[in-house]
Image: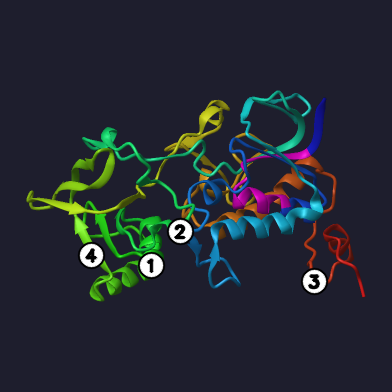
Amino acid sequence: MTIQTDAVIVGAGPVGLFQVFELGLLGLKAEVIDSLPQVGGQCAELYPEKPIYDIPAWPVIGAQELVDKLMEQIAPFNAGMHLGQQVERFEKREDGRFTVVTSKGTEFDAGAVIIAAGLGAFQPRQLRAKGVEEVTDDHIHYKVTDRERFRGKRLLILGGGDSALDWTMDLADIAESIELVHRRKEYRGQVASVARVRELAGEGKVRERQGIIRKVNSDNGRFVGFDMMDLDRNEFTVAGDEVLVFWGLAPNLGPIADWGLELEKKQIQVDTEKFQTSIEGVFAVGDVNTYPGKKKFILSGFHEGALAAFGVQKYVYPEARQFVQYTTTSPIMHKRLGVKGE
């Protein structure tokens, strides 16, 4: 049975979920597809307990909590969630609509397609140093699902980006010690995070290390530390109980790369009026897209989703009048949101 809908959203991360909301405000029905078995994308899969500090009105919110709040927000719009499957067939028909078929055989007749796939079929970049294959237990981590596991432990955190810095700050108060290991002195994270990590280093709660990992050391399969070489080629050893690897994600668009879209370094090129791709009727929002001045913030993805929704409405219903209504005062918006009037 083919599911008819105004839009298919490929990706159920925070931006994909918020896209449901923006479409719903315009009276558009959405169906969401994701290869993961749960909604939330990277937030749910890689760092559900990660604190996020740049969501408006939330001084701090956990990644999974953000996903839960988004699901609550989009509940009035009854979007179909098709999880644990990916798009295997994509075709734009002569009538301008799209046929989309997933790996589970779910078929959609969609007015438009919105790609909110983040980094695609992402995988964390792996620790591949000599000796890693001899570590038989689970002391090398690529995400944090249980923060309390690290209480009182000697932690080695690998990386210099936002995830490494965020978890260094978050775990500093519960770990016995933290050594932050990066290949250079400069970090890639936000300026405020770098400053805070340096403060923690000054307080003795964090030790900064620079260099490359030459060997993973283990004792009967249990991780015990690294042999390393610093920037001056001096060799040294660091010891620890657990290692957290935050070297980023290896982007892989998967089947989307074969849709005939214009790409730039494995990202989808879009305009900045409605975030439409090189194929009319196909839009891309969030980390999967690129345009001049692009910044990979969740906040940016939310903005893109709002404008993309108007682009979808214009494409699917070209004769419909478009105007901006405000959720505070619009009776139509209140009805769509299920808000009861006074």
Q: CA distance from mark 1 to mark 2?
A: 9 Å
Question: Is residue 26 visible to us here?
Answer: no
Q: Earlier in the sequence, mark 3 or mark 4?
A: 4
Q: Residue at x 86, y 61 (%)?
A: 338
Q: CA distance from mark 3 to mark 1?
A: 43 Å
Disc 2 packing (10 Å; few <14; some 14–19; many ≥20): some
Q: CA distance from mark 1 to mark 4?
A: 15 Å
Q: Are marks 1 and 2 in contact (CB under 8 Å)?
A: yes
Q: Earlier in the sequence, mark 1 or mark 2?
A: 2
Q: Is residue 186 above or below residue 136?
A: below
Closest to the camera, between mark 3 and mark 4, is: 4
Q: Quadrant of the C terminus?
A: bottom right
Left or right: 32, with 53 as reference point: right
Q: Secondary structure at mark 3?
A: loop
Q: Earlier in the sequence, mark 2 or mark 3?
A: 2
Question: Residue beneath label 3, please?
Answer: 328
Question: Residue beneath label 2, please?
Answer: 147
Q: Position of residue 231 (x, y in %)?
A: 12, 52
**What range is drawn magenta here?**
6-20
Closest to the camera, between mark 2 and mark 3, is: 2
Closest to the camera, between mark 2 and mark 4, is: 2
Whether residue 18 appears in magenta in the rendering, the answer is: yes
Q: Position of residue 161 (x, y in %)?
A: 35, 56
Disc 3 packing (10 Å; few <14; some 14–19; many ≥20): few
Residue 207 has which mark?
4
- Of residue 197 and residue 306, the one placed in the foreground of this image is 197
Q: Earlier in the sequence, mark 1 or mark 4?
A: 1
Question: Residue beneath label 1, please?
Answer: 174
